[in-house]
Amino acid sequence: MMIFSLDRDHRALAAAVAADLDTTVSAHEDRRFEDGECKLRPLADPRGEDAYVFQSLHGASDDSPHDKLVRLLMFIAALRDHGARRVTAVVPYLAYARKDRRTKPHDPLGLRVVAQLLEAVGAAQVMVLEVHNLAAFENAFRIPTVHVDARRALEAAVLPLIGAGPVAVASPDPGGTKRAQLWRDELESRLQRPVGFAMVDKTRSAGVLGGGRLVAGDVERATVILFDDLIATGDTLARAQSALRATGARRVIACAAHGLFVGAAASTLADAGFDQVLVTDSVPPFRLPEGHRVPLGIATCAPLFAEALRDSHASWAH
C-alpha cells in the first residue's frame, strides 16, 4: 500500500491515517511553474502498488477547488502511467457534490462531470466523507465508491453533551432528512431511550435562502443535534437554530462533516447562540479569524479513513 497527500495546507489527516496503518505518507514532487502550471510525480516507484491519493477539494489560500481537482487528476494519471495496479482517490470533501441534479433549465450536473474526469484518468475507486446526496453520488460513478459516514466521527464528541433529558436529531432542510434519521436511529440504539426527530423547512432559488421558520417534529425541552453535511456561510443552520429555539428546544448543537466557513460564517455562527458547533477535520478551519467567537469543536475522521483503507486494501489483496 502507498499513501500520498496532495493537500499542501492539510497534510495532517493523511499522516494520521498512515500512522494508524503503521506506514508513512510517500513522497512526491510538487513543482509550480511561473504561469501556474504544475508538475506532480511520485518519488517512489508505484509499479504494482495499491495507491491511495488524499486530496480534499475545498478552496484554499493558494488553490481553488478547480486547481486541486486538476492536480488530483494529473497525479492519478502519473501513477497509472507508471504501473500502479490500482489508484483510489481519497477525497474527504468532494467539490461539486452539491450540484447533483437539475433544478433550473440547462443546469450542469457538476458531480457527474467530476466522476467522468476521475474515471477518465484511471481512478479505480473513490472514497469520500459524507456527501451531499448519497444516492446521487453512487449513481454518478461507474467505478466503486466508498462513503464514510461523518456521524461516526462526530458521535464521540456529541455523546458527552447530550445529558439525561430529552434529545432529538434535526435536519435543517428537507434534503437532509434521511441523513438525520439515520443518526437518530443509531443514537436511540446507543442511548437505549427514545430520540426524537425534527425537520426545518428551507428553500433556495438563485442563491437566495428562504423558509427556515417552520419545524416538523417535537423538540420541546430537548437537546437538539442539528445535523448537516456542510457549513458554508452558516445561514442555513442559524435559521434552523432560531426556529428550533422558538419551538421549545432547550439546547442546539450544530454538527456538520465539512466546515467551509465562507463569507460571514464566523459572525453568523457566533451570534446564532449555538451551544456547540462540531465539524470534522476534512477541511481545516483556516477561514475562521484568530479570536473568533464560534464555540467550535473538531472531531477527527482519520480513524474512519484508516478503517476504510484497511478494508479496501485487504479485499483487493485477496
Image: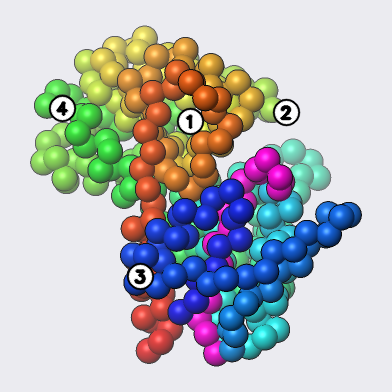
Look at the image and give the residue range highlighted in magenta: 48-64
Q: Residue at x 19, y 41 (%)?
A: 188
Q: Secondary structure at mark 2?
A: loop
CA distance separating discs 3 and 1: 37 Å
Query: Do labels 3 and 1 touch, CB within 8 Å?
Result: no
Residue 55 position, x and y percent, is 58, 58
Location of residue 42 in the rendering, given as x and y in whole percent from the top left corner: 63, 75
* Outermost residue to the right: 35
Q: Position of residue 40 (x, y in %)?
A: 71, 68
Q: Which x, y percent locates residue 163?
A: 15, 27
**Which quarter of the figure has residue 62?**
top right
Amino acid on which disc 4 is placed: Gly
Which of pointers 3 and 4 lies earlier in the amino acid sequence?
3
- Provide the residue designation for mark 4: 163
Residue sitting nearer the eye, 97 or 77 = 77
Q: Residue at x 33, y 65 (%)?
A: 20
- In primary-sequence order, the first of circles 1 and 2 is 1
Q: How is the image coloured?
A: rainbow
Which residue, given by chain and number where applicable, does mark 3 sit on?
21
Residue at the far top in the pictured view: 246
10 Å crowding of disc 4: few (<14), some (14-19), many (20+): few
Cα distance in 3D space between marks 3 and 2: 45 Å
| Contact? badges 1 and 2 (CB < 8 Å) | no
Query: Callout 3 environment at 10 Å: few (<14), some (14 to 19), or many (20+)?
Result: some
Task: Compute the Cα span from label 3 to label 4.
Answer: 35 Å
Label 2: which residue? 206
Pointer 3 or 1: first along the chain: 3
Quarter of the image where one finds residue 142: bottom right
The residue that label 1 is drawn on is 173
